[in-house]
Image (spheres, helix red, strand yellow):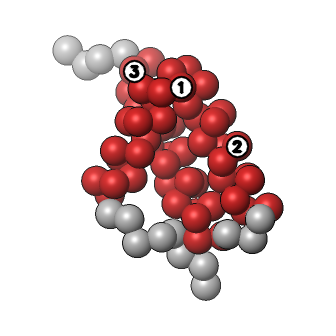
Amino acid sequence: MVVALPIGPDGIHRAAEEMITEHGSEALAEAKKRARTVRSEGFESLAKTWDLICAVIRDVDDSKHSPKAH
């Protein structure tokens, strides 16, 4: 079984925030590209970590576009 690298939730969130800061609206596309690249090079554990970063970027993006409850 391949699992993500042992990076805690704080590290995953920090990496996602850094991607958003660096790449703005293209952060998710860039993170997906990195996941594909490392996966194609045979680094499945690192790819799983990038998949988790992608999920956080999606969550952040969704929260920015969802209507706020009053």
26 sits to left or right of 55:
right
Quick check: marks 3 and 1 in contact, CB under 8 Å?
Answer: no
Closer to us: 2 or 33: 33
Closer to us: 51 or 33: 33
Residue type, numbered disc 2: Lys
What residue lies at 39% left-to-right and 21% top-to-bottom?
64
Q: Does the image show residue 38?
A: yes
What residue lies at 73% left-to-right and 52% top-to-bottom?
36
Can you identify the residue that label 1 sits on? 23
Q: x%, y% of residue 6?
A: 40, 72
1 sits to left or right of 61:
right
Of badges 3 and 1, nearer the viewer stands: 1
Of helix, strand and loop, which one carries label 1? helix
Residue type, numbered disc 1: His
Can you identify the residue that label 3 sits on? 64
Which residue extends farthest bottom?
Answer: 1
* Quarter residue 17 falls in: top left
Disc 2: CA contacts within 10 A as few (<14), some (14-19) or many (>=20) = some
* Quarter residue 38 falls in: bottom right
Sequence-wise first label, 3 or 1: 1
How far is mark 2 from mark 1, CA to CA? 13 Å
Decide: is 56 above or below 52: above
The quarter in which the C terminus is drawn is: top left
Quick check: marks 2 and 3 in contact, CB under 8 Å?
Answer: no
Can you identify the residue that label 2 sits on? 33
Of helix, strand and loop, which one carries label 3? helix
Of helix, strand and loop, which one carries label 2? helix
Decide: is 38 above or below 6: above
